[in-house]
Amino acid sequence: MSNVSVPSAGAVTIHGTVESGFEPVREVFAENFHDRNELGAAVAVYSRGELVVDLWGGYRDTDHEHPWEADTMVLVASGTKGMTAAAIAVALSRGLFALDDRIADHWPAFAQHGKDQVTVRQLLSHQAGLATLDGRLSPEQIADTEFLSGLLASEKLDWVPGTRHGYHAFTLGWYASELLRHTDGRTLGQFFTEEVAEPLGLEFYIGLPEEIPPDRVADLDAFGYLDMLLNLRTLSPRFVLSFFNPWSVTNRALNVLDTRRPADLNSPAFRAVEIPSGNGIGTARAMARLYGELATGGGALGLDKDVFAELTAPPLPPSGDRRDVVIGMETAYAMGYSKPSPDFRFGTSDASFGTPGAGGSFGFADPDVGLGFAYTPNRLGLHLKDDPREVALREAVYECIERRSSETDSPRTRL
């Protein structure tokens, strides 16, 4: 592993370490600052249990005054879903509930308004028809567990469960948390900390503790609503029009927080509460460590073999249209994760799983090659998928892995 502390072409210093053979990832990371308008970011990669890339650079504030440090954390939006899904995988492995259990059997109040047959599998596959909420939630309401539980239980279905799927942008995590609370007693944030983060030594939080100094968390340089209208090519006209239609499922699924702009999610009040689908804060190193563990079977977390098989299996599509009701493109989901689909390819096969976050963050596991990858920026981009900064890094990682594999397999190397 070689240490890195060199200025890029744009005078931004890149810090961290790269294993021999992964130097091209460092070069692409530097290019992001010079050519792709990066502000501050980190990228980390585990390959078969080994940390081979751990890089950070740029600034953690929008005034370019405070450098991104080794321990700088950042909010990763829906990248949080991957951490939440790992907690659920651990809960499944311990038999707290089963994938084909009806949620109402564990949480009777959930059965209201025809939800009595909704299964855990349908929820984790975004097929439950529970993508929206009536009204917008303040941090105080989110922190009131009984209030939130009652609100979730009283929601009506957006579609017949199992017939369609649509991105449960915020609701997935809260429903999963209630399922855990009714079977284990802990909220999802508590369960994640004690059963996932602490065993693996991860610095990642769903609900930021008071003792974490504010300057440990990078500021978000977030886009505004006008920026969305000016970037129809990367966000897609279908999605943007639906987002601004107050009666659409898209609008009601994505606008459930009492905020005025996307960056408000990074305010101290919203950082402190548990939003298991959207306000996780941590390092790329922590995310890559978890995905690297999952990619190699999850033994350190006690992951059951059948649960690992579900993570890597092809997703079970809804019975109807596979176009996502909320984001308007063809997607695939299973076990709380995004899976490779025609409109979003990642990994070497359909065994891969991960979660992208609004603005460009992405973490995923590729079991075929034992890979855990995470990229976390603080300048939010305007792509529904495949942010150019992240794609460039991902492609560089695979090129390095392929080169390493070919060298290992060559007759000269074996001698």
Image (cartoon, rainbow, N blue to C red):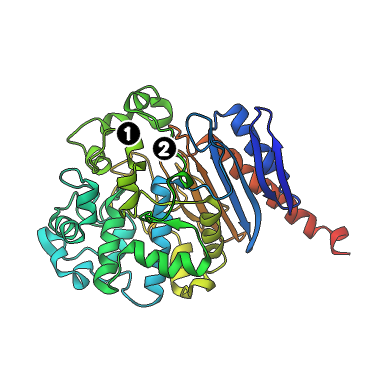
Which amino acid, mark 2? Leu
Left or right: 190 with respect to 204? left
In this view, 320 is above or below 328: below
Q: Is residue 129 visible?
A: no
Query: Considering depth in this image, is 359 or 70 the residue closer to the camera?
Result: 70
Distance from disc 2 to disc 1, alpha carbons, whole Å, reads 9 Å
Q: Which residue is mark 1?
A: 239
Q: What residue appears at the point 40 percent right and 64 percent down from the top-left corner?
A: 192
| Discs 2, 1 touching: Cβ within 8 Å | yes
Left or right: 179 with respect to 333? left
Left or right: 414 with respect to 277? right
Q: Secondary structure at mark 2?
A: loop
**Quadrant in which the N terminus appears:** bottom right
Question: Residue 79 location, x and y as percent?
Answer: 43, 49
In this view, 110 is above or below 359: below
Query: Considering depth in this image, is 237 or 186 the residue closer to the camera?
Result: 186
Q: Which residue is mark 2?
A: 384
Question: Residue 352 location, x and y as percent?
Answer: 51, 56
Q: Residues within 10 Å of mark 2 (few under 14, many from 20)?
A: some
Which amino acid, mark 1? Phe
Q: What residue appears at the point 56 percent right and 60 percent down from the top-left corner?
A: 292
